[in-house]
Image (tube, grey):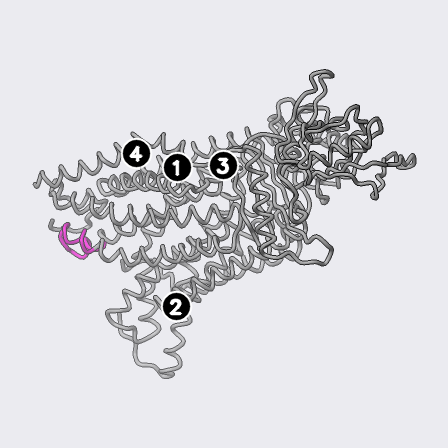
Amino acid sequence: MKARFNLVRNRKWFFMLSGAITVAGLIVFLVSGFNLGTDFVAGSRVQLQLNQPVNTAKVQQLFQEAGIPLDEGAITTAGGPGKQAAVVRLTEVLTPAQVNQIKTLEAKMFPKSQSADISTVDPLVAKQTSQKAVWAVLIASLFIVIYVAIRFEYRFAISGIVALLHDAFIVMSAFALLRLEVDLTFVAAILTIVGYSINDTIVIFDRIRENLKGKPPASMEELEEVVNRSLWQTMTRSINTVATVLIAALMLYFFGGTSIRTFTFALIVGLVSGAYSSIFIASPLWVTWRGRQFRKQKPSGEVPQAN
Amino acid sequence: MKWGRFAAFIALVLVVVGLTVGTSQQLWKSIRLGLDLQGGFELLYQVEPNTPGGTVSAQGVQAALQAVTTRVNSLGVASPVIQLENKNQIRVDLAGTFSQAQAEAYIGQTADLKIYGKATYNAKTKTWVPDPKTLLITGNDIKPDAAAGQNPNTGQYEVDVTFKNAKRWQQITQQYLGKPLYTFLNGQMITDPAPSEVIYNGQTAISGGDLTTLQACQTLAQELNSGALPYPLKLVSSTSVGPSLGAASLKATMWAGLGAVALIFLFMLLLYRAAGFIADIALVAYAYLLLLTFAGLHVVLTLPGLAALVLGIGMAVDANIITYERIKDELRNGRSLQSSVIAGNKRALRTIIDANATTFIAGAVMYWFGQGDIRGFAVSLMLSIVVSLITAVLLSRAMLLLYTRSNVVKRPWWFGYRARKAVES
């Protein structure tokens, strides 16, 4: 285990990579923002599972007959390779009578279709939901910090949280960039990623803590060496675990129900990012932070021991 | 070789596999599926104060919840879910297939039946306007045994009602004999029959207006029977899922889940061989126990919940991978196979608990702050973590120790360890 790549010493490259991704994500946000679903924006969402390629003009005609005006670009197609589902977004809240009318017209105009999924949300509820979602992420992070600070130390806790916020941000950026609809299940996906990311990171931190127990490092070089060794010791586990979870997520993405496709997509992006950040961001961050005390304590420094 | 221990190990494997194969189908059927899986709709009502700017007391909300529960139960839907949320919102989940408008009429509306002695026709708005001074009797004076029926003479659908105070109804029919009685439902006139005889027993029938179908009459009868809501309910959000879409999604997700499990099994066998086999058996036990827990706790399984279940398998696998990699580390340090297994298990445990505890915390926060789908997902996640700790740690460890101590195999190769240097076993 000697001739292996020194992950920790090259940390500035990974920090730069993540920094670049973060900046790119911020730009995407500023330019386009989220494509919020009806869970967060008041209005109605009608999903027509047509079981035949979507003919936008005909869908438009359906709504015209129901007497519901459509905005430009209100109709989008979904439902995998065949694009057999149409999603119509309305800023108005549909009345039960309109809902029934749409269903009747759908059965008449698209005989092959299944009954539509229709959801409506009042502005008040939408606001409550989005506020709850943000609070859930922040409070989950807070509780995780407290737990890790008690079991490990606060520097581990903060480094781990930075890594998981990094993962959550990358998933959000991907959704903003690809214009994917953000709904309540997206929040569930983000929270799972938060859970997985910290899970992955803790296993590595645990090994660092154990390897530090024998002899505390006397210099930055020793600290780097210990962390690098810990990372390589847990590498097989990190890769194998992410591989198994990815197998499950990929199978669900390609073969699972259409309604969980955005959910599993978020998970896939988050799992890859989570594995990356646990190895390349969380631990190197901790080294940088922890290493500061060497500079403070021994400005001139003793001669580092040869490895 | 200690064949006794090996036999115990085989017996354990057979018990797990046998139980699962024998009862899992029945178990699966007893699990309640969420709306997204079986179709239906979800309605979210807000309890509004009676007057603008007024307040709704906590007791009032409880009374409204009670009233909604009575109404939903009278619908006869299988296992509805009625929950209070955010202190003044009532969530109603109804599975099955029927008209959403009909259900909304049952739950959120009160049939406001009023009979007047005088009303005038407004030609401009084409509506009848009652004279409030001549209000004779209301729906509150009706016994809760209204029923839909059919007039034997005309074949017209009607709602048969009985007035609580038969004497009062007798007086009214006497006074208005041959004169029209203006019957208003929710502010709209539905009929203006003229009594042709005095009714002594309080029984009468209402027909006309929109009451042209049996269904409409049944709805009105239900509404009259369920009484008035203590506060108006405002429908703030509704979601409806087509039944066949849900079924198709479920089927696809189930197959995807099974495929994922099969691939993970293969992956573990290839990586860790005999130990991988033990992990696979522990995974079978994990899935089985989790379904058992779902059925026992009446957890409603939603699509995200199902995803949490399948992904939970990944977490259970992780616990095994951590342990096996630890064992390999110990072997690398030159320990014997048996002591490596014991030490590896011991050292892996703390890591597993710390890692799972943090994810569990995330799940608990999700449950606390989430609603609807997120809650279902959080419950699945938390349960899967607890069950995976039991199976992937306790069961897996017991099996691994039994297997190792039976001395059936001595080569570390069976544990996925490829010796780079000589290791004595």
> Where's residue B180, x and y in %?
83, 29
Give the residue type at disc 4: Thr
Question: Is residue B330 covered in magenta?
Answer: yes
- Please, what secondary structure does the residue beneath circle 4 have? helix
Q: Does label 1 or label 4 sit earlier along the sequence?
A: 4
Residue A67 vs residue B370: left or right?
Answer: right
- Please, what secondary structure does the residue beneath circle 3 have? loop
Q: Are marks 2 and 4 on the same chain?
A: no
- State which chain disc 3 sits on: B
Cα distance, mark 1 to mark 4?
Answer: 18 Å
- State which chain disc 1 sits on: B
Instruction: Magenta stretch: give its range.
Output: B329-343
- Please, what secondary structure does the residue beneath circle 2 have? helix
Cα distance, mark 2 to mark 4?
Answer: 41 Å
Question: Is residue A167 covered in magenta?
Answer: no
Q: Tell me where residue B296 sits by quadrant.
A: top left
- Tag 4: Cα neighbours inside 10 Å, few (<14), some, or many (≥20)? some
Cα distance, mark 2 to mark 3?
Answer: 44 Å
Are dots 2 and 3 in contact, CB under 8 Å? no
> Where's residue A158, x and y in %?
44, 67
